[in-house]
């Protein structure tokens, strides 16, 4: 793995101050989401890594503000953050090193700013005021408003000039799968926080109540509901197959690893059954390391093959 200093150089990040901004953004990602950070550092082409790290740090910053405090506090926090982001994108400057790095990444990579504004608008509406989904259409509207632009403020930076319509549509399929898996894996924690992330209409279809889920009741109806949701997530994963072909070559190993991790987590959810209502289903430690190491080994093998090293 190249050093961080050489990675910044490969990406053409100039100046001590700006390089420090990118370093701080990357450290924020490492603290909050070590698995995606390691995937980027181990597997992505170095010229892409700083911008993507800044994008992920920005996405996480918005998520944190949208999910912290009372609805009034979230709304006020997002309004203030939106003003700071707009200033950073316009001027390239901000008191926040994450916003300075992200503004530079957006400018240098040519990401259309409408993805950023759309994400911030979705954070202030679909996420900050979240009170569950009435039905599948409600879930899809949430993806369009918040989750999809949230992924593209990060992954869109891989494309010089931003994603084209086919690439953007591919990431829409990817985020559909990712959100379904995430909601199932985090059922216990979300319910404990007062968030029901399964559409209420589907609870009604299976004659399951919210109290059944909050009480982790092991009934045939609850088991049938969770199995049906897992099948929907599995179908969404299948529909997202091929997203790697729409990614830039330097990011394809990361995308493949993300898909493998999602599939691993969904399998764990399926095995847990009603147990997913008693504890969140994480990645664990062994499987992510195994997936990352396998991907890193394959990347090194491709590099040796290109250079003719046997």
Image (cartoon, rainbow, N blue to C red):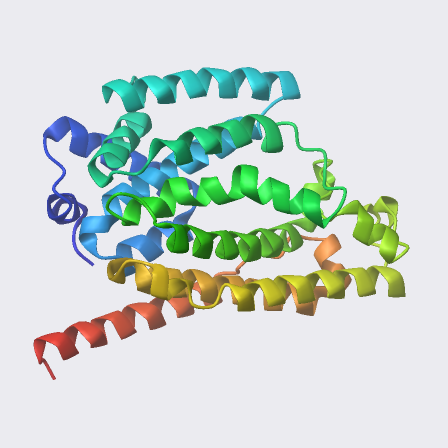
Q: Residue furthest front?
A: 165
Residue 144 or residue 253, whichever sits in front: 144
Q: Residue furthest bottom?
A: 310
Q: Residue at x 62, y 41 (%)?
A: 141
Q: Is residue 115 left or right of residue 91?
A: right
Residue 256 against residue 304 in the figure, above or below: above
Which quadrant is the N terminus positioned in?
A: bottom left
Residue 67 against residue 151 in the figure, above or below: above
Residue 109 or residue 13, whichever sits in front: 109
Image x and y of residue 198, in percent: 73, 49
Residue 165 or residue 195, whichever sits in front: 165
Residue 3 against residue 115 in the figure, above or below: below
**Within the image, what quadrant is residue 31 found in?**
top left
**Within the image, what quadrant is residue 21 found in?**
top left
Image x and y of residue 118, in percent: 47, 32
Which quadrant is the C terminus positioned in?
A: bottom left
Residue 193 against residue 35 in the figure, above or below: above
Q: Residue at x 23, y 22 (%)?
A: 92
Q: Is residue 282 visible?
A: no
Q: Residue at x 31, y 35 (%)?
A: 25
Q: Is residue 196 visible?
A: yes
Q: How many marks are shown on the rendered structure?
A: 0
Q: Residue at x 28, y 29 (%)?
A: 103
Image x and y of residue 117, in percent: 43, 28
**Within the image, what quadrant is residue 100 found in?**
top left
Image x and y of residue 306, in percent: 13, 75
């Amino acid at each position: 793995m190249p050093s961080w200093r050489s990675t910044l150089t490969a990406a053409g990040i100039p100046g001590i101050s700006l390089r420090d901004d990118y370093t701080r953004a990357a450290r924020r990602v490492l603290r909050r989401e070590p698995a995606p950070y390691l995937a980027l550092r181990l597997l992505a082409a170095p010229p892409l890594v700083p911008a993507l790290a800044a994008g992920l740090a920005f996405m996480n910053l918005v998520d944190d503000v949208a999910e912290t405090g009372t609805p009034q506090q979230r709304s006020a926090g997002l309004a203030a953050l939106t003003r700071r982001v707009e200033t950073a994108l316009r001027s390239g400057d901000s008191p926040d090193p994450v916003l300075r790095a992200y503004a530079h990444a957006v400018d240098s990579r040519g990401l259309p700013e409408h993805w950023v504004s759309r994400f911030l608008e979705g954070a202030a509406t679909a996420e900050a005021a979240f009170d569950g989904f009435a039905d599948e259409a409600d879930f899809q509207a949430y993806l369009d408003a918040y989750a999809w632009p949230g992924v593209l403020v990060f992954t869109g930076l891989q494309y010089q000039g931003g994603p084209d319509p086919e690439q953007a549509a591919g990431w829409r399929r990817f985020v559909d799968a990712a959100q379904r898996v995430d909601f199932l894996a985090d059922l216990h924690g979300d319910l404990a926080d007062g968030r029901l992330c399964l559409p209420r209409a589907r609870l009604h279809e299976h004659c399951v109540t919210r109290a059944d889920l909050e009480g982790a009741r092991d009934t045939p109806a609850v088991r049938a509901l969770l199995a049906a949701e897992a099948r929907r997530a599995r179908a969404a994963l299948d529909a997202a197959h091929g997203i790697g072909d729409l990614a830039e070559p330097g990011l394809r190993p990361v995308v493949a690893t993300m898909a493998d991790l999602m599939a691993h987590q969904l399998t764990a959810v399926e095995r847990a059954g009603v147990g997913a209502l008693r504890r969140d289903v994480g990645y664990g430690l062994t499987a992510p390391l195994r997936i990352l190491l396998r991907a890193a080994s394959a990347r090194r093998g491709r590099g040796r093959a290109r250079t003719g090293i046997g």
